[in-house]
Amino acid sequence: MDKKMLIKRLNEDLAGELGAIIQYLTYAAKATGPYRPQLSQFFLTEVADEQLHAQYLANKVVALGGEPATEPRPVPAAKTNREMLEAVLAAERKATADYTQRAKEAEALGDKGLAVQLEDMVRDESGHSEETERILRDWPL
Ligand SMILES: [Fe+2]
Ligand SMILES: [Fe+2]
């Protein structure tokens, strides 16, 4: 892993965050039924966190001498509330795993500031996963 590869990986992470923002915005609009108010609010609350992650990553890519990605990762198709929650859970688990790995890579390259920030992001994403898991745990349909 060299600096160039790290920039590439951070840009993949950034694409994931841009995709997450679109995913949450879209799912907030699509939530239906008696739980719509809570679900929609839950999805919209996540947008703020993902935006901060995207902002951090874009800044870091520029600081490292790269060009920040502008193409979002595609949003998985989901029809029902349950499918949306499952898609969100998969995305949050992936983000947790990716940042866990990225923090190790940053540490190995001697960028402690980046490693610490990525570990903070592991905490955020695993919090999102756990919240989504609990919503799904007793999901009625
Ligand atoms: Fe995120
Ligand atoms: Fe997240």
Image (tube, rainbow, N blue to C red):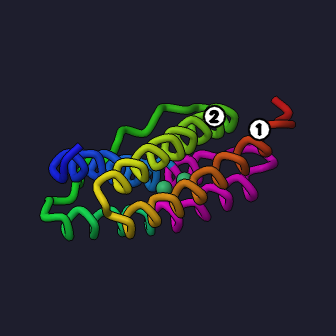
Mainly helix, strand or loop, the magenta region?
helix
Task: State which quadrant residue 40 falls in.
Answer: bottom right
Amino acid type at image mark 2: Glu
Q: Assess whether mark 1 and mark 2 are in contact (beta carbons under 8 angstroms).
A: yes
Q: Helix, strand or loop at disc 1?
A: helix
Image coords of residue 68 (percent x, y) = 21, 59
Q: Is 74 situated above or below 16?
A: above
On residue 17, the disc is none
Q: Residue at x 42, y 60 (%)?
A: 115
Which of the two discs, 2 and 1, labels the residue nearer the N terminus?
2
The stretch of residues the image draws in magenta is: 24-50
Side of 83 relative to 114 (left or right): right
Q: Residue at x 73, y 51 (%)?
A: 131
Q: Is 5 situated above or below 119?
A: above
Q: From mark 2 to mark 1, how far is it between C-alphas?
A: 8 Å
Image coords of residue 8 (percent x, y) = 22, 47
Q: Mark 2 near ligand 2 (CB under 8 Å)?
A: no
Side of 44 relative to 82 (left or right): left
Task: State which quadrant residue 37 falls in.
Answer: bottom right
Q: Which residue is mark 1?
A: 136
Q: Residues within 10 Å of mark 2 (few under 14, many from 20)?
A: some
Depth check: give the residue in front, 137 or 39.
137
Q: Is residue 12 magenta?
A: no
Q: Is residue 25 magenta?
A: yes
Q: Which residue is mark 2?
A: 86
Q: Residue at x 23, y 62 (%)?
A: 61
Q: Quadrant of the N terminus?
A: top left
Image coords of residue 56 (percent x, y) = 36, 68
Q: Helix, strand or loop at disc 2?
A: helix
Amino acid type at image mark 1: Leu
Q: Residues within 10 Å of mark 1 (few under 14, many from 20)?
A: some
Q: Residue at x 43, y 53 (%)?
A: 103
